[in-house]
Amino acid sequence: MNILFACSELYPLIKTGGLADVAYNLPLALQRQGHAVRIVLPAYRSLLNNLSHLKAVGQITTTIQGYDVSLLKTNLKNTDIPVYLVHCPALFDRPGGPYGEYSGSGSGWEDNAQRFGLFCRIVTLIGVNRAGLDWQPDLVHCNDWHTGLVPLLLKVYKSRPKSLFTIHNLAYQGLFSKADFTALKLPEIVDNVRLWDFRAVEFYGKMSFIKAGIVFADTVNTVSRGYAQEVLTTKFGCGLHGLLRFIGQRFCGIGNGIDNNLWDPGNDHFIETLYGPSSLHRKIFNKLALQAEFHLPSNHERLLIGVVSRLTDQKGIDLILDALPLIMQQSLDLVVLGSGDKNIEQALLQAVRKYPGRLSVKLIYDERIAHLIIAGADALLIPSRYEPCGLTQMYAQRYGTVPVAHGVGGLADTIIDIPPYSEDIADATGVLFWEHSVNALFEALLRLEFVYGNLLLWRELQRAGMRENFSWDQSAKVYADLYQSLLPELM
Ligand code: ADP
Ligand code: GLC
């Protein structure tokens, strides 16, 4: 099959979260299975600065939404997979993050409707082979709200590729004003539905990009089975649970995988010492290096817990802060790597002043330190309020680092909870707490400490996690089957 993969982030060019990792690994895994994949994303300034020898390709004859646009081409790192960059200097060549002035949270660029509206139009032109590339995809795989208008715009063409819309996070919806909607000059009626209607893109008086994707795509999925169930409820559905229920069988969950080459304790140039399931004693050197990196006292016995996370409300860092007075009574230390919300950053800095030598924080985005935490910590704490899939819990398991997580979405799907205070841990791979509360988090840590206190049991738990297979090949196969189900003529 020919697949066009449309996304707003792509590892290692531009990344704010797991979407960038998925956008790198899924196309690669699909290619391994014999599919021809091409990727398209906006040509942000930071990305242009890091790439040389960009070639202009194709031809987009008219100005789009009044802007000059061209297509540049590069390849996915270390592969021959084509990556098209939508080059529109007025909209994408500016300092800051892909969605706003700051790459963390905060308000987005004022013209985001125009920016991603234009991006969607170009993706559509490539989709219907009208961008001068002489290439026709069978399916356009759209990701998150930034690509939400693509399924809608494709519907205008009689002969068109199929579309899949993947929801990586339902809370980010791409909501804009009626004026923004009007300025986008979309067709008034698509598929016999008036666009400015609650059955189409209108959402409580606003325009919703994500709704456009859900309503008009041939099929829709999210990134774990657990989250696919959760978003059908008011608690997790972000106002869209009714619509997701309504589309029924057209919606499913497919879990993400991880990059087993990039995340491999036996071959990771970011870490201090390489190790594997039969040399877990060597992991200790990474722990010592991690303590040194975070200026914590060197101590190979004390439980060391790590956090690697965007700092947003979703990630529940406030729960860790609330639990600190209890946690810090235990014999453990905590290192946090994260960036994002300024209030959360400030609160973390304040906590560091309260618990010097026990809690250490780096408020940056740093690949190397992320690897060192995943390798050097004994456990990784993930207290997310909700988690569509989550990748770090899978990295941790591959590194014999025990995940301790809130039992939601992809976290509950990929971690097998230890039976409480038992010497028979069976197939368990981590610790889950089911209530998002200080007490539940604290109790989970007590259960963790129980196992940590018994080296044989601890090794069993570590090795069970290391045996798990989170390879992208499995998920890519499920995606390929889903594409195929929309394209019976290619069977
Ligand atoms: P989300 O996409 O919601 O942030 P995921 O767990 O799916 O959550 O993906 C997060 C990705 O970002 C992982 O690859 C993780 O290692 C990485 N990451 C998050 N924060 C940082 C950071 N401060 N430095 C380096 N990598 C980070
Ligand atoms: C989103 C979600 C995260 C998921 C990632 C990749 O950022 O928050 O849970 O793993 O997308 O699908």
Image (cartoon, grey):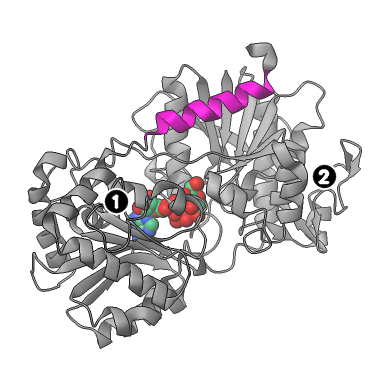
Could you tell me the amino acid type at mark 2?
Answer: Leu
Nearest to the observer: residue 257 or residue 74: 257
Nearest to the observer: residue 235 or residue 1: 235
Where are the magenta residues, as a range? 471-487
Q: Secondary structure at mark 2?
A: loop
Q: Which mark is residue 186?
A: 2
Could you tell me the amino acid type at mark 1?
Answer: Ala
The span from disc 2 to disc 1 (Cα, nearest Å) is: 45 Å
**Is the C-beta of the residue carrying label 1 under 8 Å from the nearest atom of ligand 1?**
no
Residue 414 visible in the current orientation: yes
Q: Quadrant of residue 110?
A: bottom right
Q: What residue would you read off at disc 1?
A: 396
Does the magenta stretch mainly form a helix, a strand or a loop? helix
Task: Sort mark 2 into few (<14), some (14-19) or many (20+) by Cα contacts within 10 Å.
Answer: some
- Residue 472 is covered by the magenta coloring: yes
Nearest to the observer: residue 428 or residue 311: 428
Answer left or right for 112 relative to 370.
Answer: right
Q: Is residue 38 above or below residue 319?
A: above
Q: Residue at x 45, y 75 (%)?
A: 437
Q: Residue at x 74, y 24 (%)?
A: 160
Q: Quadrant of residue 443?
A: bottom left
Nearest to the observer: residue 155 or residue 410: 410
Answer left or right for 57 relative to 278.
Answer: right
**Quadrant into which the N terminus falls:** top right
